[in-house]
Amino acid sequence: LQNHKIKFYNERNGLQNNTVLSIAFDKRNNLWLGLDNGIDYISLDTPFTTLYTYPYSSGAGYTSVIYKGFLYLGTNSGVYRTSWPVRFGELSAEIEFIPQLSGQVWDLKEIDGKLFCMHDKGLYILDGKTIESVPGLRGMWTCTKSPGNPSKLWAGGYEGMYVLEKVADKWRVKAKLEGVNDWFKNFEFESPEVAWIRNTSEGPLRIEIDTVACKVTRSRFYTLRDGLKSTRNLYISKLGKTLYFSTDSGLYTYNAGKDKMELSSAIPQSFPHSILKQYGDSVIGLDRNGIGVLKFNKEGRVLSSKMFPINHKQMDFIRYYETFQLINDSTVIIPNEYGFSLLDLTYNKPKEDNNELFIKKVYTSFPKDILLYSANFMGMEAVPEIEYKNNSLRFEYTLHAFDREKSVMYRYRLSPNGSWSEPSASESKEFSNLREGSYTFELESIDSDGSVSQTSFSFVILPPWYRSMWAYFVYFMFLVVIAYFVYRLDEWRIRRKKLFELAEKEKAMRLKEEQFIKTTTLQENEIMRLNNEKLQYELKHKSQEMANLTINFVRKNEILTDIKEDLFKVMEEMRGEPFVKVKRMLVNVNSRIDSNMQSDDLLKRFEEQFDLVHNNFMTKLSERHPDLTLSERKMCAFLKMDLSSKEMAPLLNISVRGVEAMRYRLRKRIGLEREINLLEYLNSIE
């Protein structure tokens, strides 16, 4: 090898068997072995070294520590140790088993020059020669020194947390913490009186401790309503004085002022942060996809970042027990399902990375799967022309990575108009209902270490028959025919419009004629109304004249009556012969007065004039009631003229009381019922 070191590869560290029939190097300078029962691949240029592997395993790895020149390994079968640096023999690393500590080991730590072993059976302390157990404990996860009091330890176990104190160079249990019974597999102190405990179901638990009475005074779980988006795969790490809470949703820190969780800004969210540890000015982080190293300057800014992807086929973690131990600034030990691996942090990846991104196959996915393209070792690519009915395509792609398993994200776009998709781990993509045209499927892979590979695939979707050149010619001819018919239709529309306009004009003329007739009729009606009003006015005038004539006649009769009375008085005063001639003259005057008062001509003229004004009222009254006397007919006329009883008395030459009596006899003569008004009855005679 280039560093002149000899490495042994056999069944104990990974080969299927030891019978090697042929060997060859590939273009990336890695080794391929032809065995008698298959082919094996050896990545010579890798930062990882395996201490042991299946089937020659010493157990699944959980923890490790360097103590007094030895590397101690905690597994599910007990504690092993080997020299440090590890000496690899021809077969495998020389590993020694410690039989007193057989069984499940959870953690190993060096405290005050002694090695503490957290075991399924309790807590054991090794000083290199002797092994002693701390009485009163069983099933211990881990332990740490009490902040501010190095003579005390906090130890987490299956049944809770314990305080250990050092008495006469011996560690003994002082008390058990009261008030909380969680599994203390992962806890960190915020201060001597405040601790955070990992609870994978409910979230991180913050407890305040009365260190004198050794009991919890206050506790609280921090969940989704306190800023966390998830509590799955929770792990608590402490870097300096800062606590970090890692979950599936990101890396959080605790904001004491707001009493809530916030996403970390000091460490990038893309950095592996399931478990964080500090070494000098560097932070090493681990998740299931790899290990990262961040180097900071004095101001806390990131100077450099480095990623080491992990191949899970060779090194798989124990679920929920992922961890690593920093040996020095260049070596990390990673416990895993197969044992332990060493990581060289000084490893630099070669500048030329021959990992190749390639499109494996291209299929039409509708109406049925048809293989259009398959990758070949010649690297030959075509630009297929695809019928429109097969315009749904599926692309399958991957990244060559024989040397290690990579955590790869892919993104793609379909040019010319597509945009880059969000990165995804999926290794296939399907497009449906693509329009005709030339396309290029562009693909990028983004490795966990930041490296990017690119490839592309070009193809053409042919147009459907209804968008072909012949189809467009037919469409053109069809449009010409439609244009002709549209032209003829327009002519027909113009003729129809003219006919419609003519009909509208005729309709307007009819409406005007009807309006004229209506107006003429209204005018004639108005003339008739005015004539009727004139006639009514003349009738009213005639009635008034006749009333005035009647009143004058009444007044004349009244005056003549008064004169007659005066004549009678004068005649009574004139006695004897001398007044005979005068008395005769007075009698003659009285006769002439009576003749004037009882003139039939005047009454006849009155009736004629009354009939003329009142539409032959007197004639109709005589026809309907021929038995009425002259006085009764006159009274009916006076009632028709709306004269009062007082006004009718002198006209009838009777008293007012006589008028009322005559009105009563007139009702009986006509035969009117009591409820019928006499005046209304007379007005009804037309």
Image (cartoon, rainbow, N blue to C red):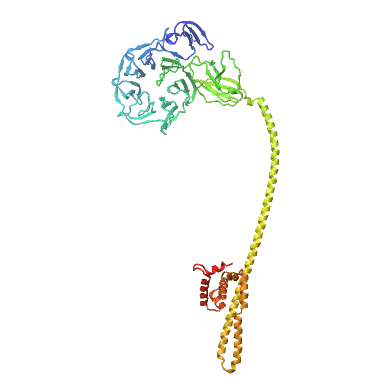
Residue 662 visible in the displayed image: yes
Who's the residue at 40% across and 30% down the image? 223
Q: Is residue 547 left or right of residue 36?
A: right
Q: Is residue 489 or residue 647 the one in the foreground? A: 647
How many dots with numbers?
A: 0
Q: Position of residue 573 (x, y in %)?
A: 55, 91
Q: Is residue 537 or residue 438 the one in the foreground? A: 537
Residue found at the far bottom of this picture: 577
Residue found at the far front of this picture: 627
Q: Is residue 467 or residue 332 the one in the foreground? A: 467
Who's the residue at 57% across and 86% down the image? 566
In the figure, residue 281 lies in which quadrant? top left
Who's the residue at 69% across and 42% down the image? 497
Q: Position of residue 487 (x, y in %)?
A: 70, 36
Q: Position of residue 472 (x, y in %)?
A: 66, 27
Is residue 651 positioned above or below 8 on the image?
below
Residue 239 visible in the displayed image: no
Instruction: Name the image quarter holding the C terminus.
Output: bottom right
Q: Position of residue 116 (x, y in %)?
A: 34, 18
Is residue 149 positioned above or below 126 on the image?
below
Q: Is residue 524 or residue 477 the one in the foreground? A: 524
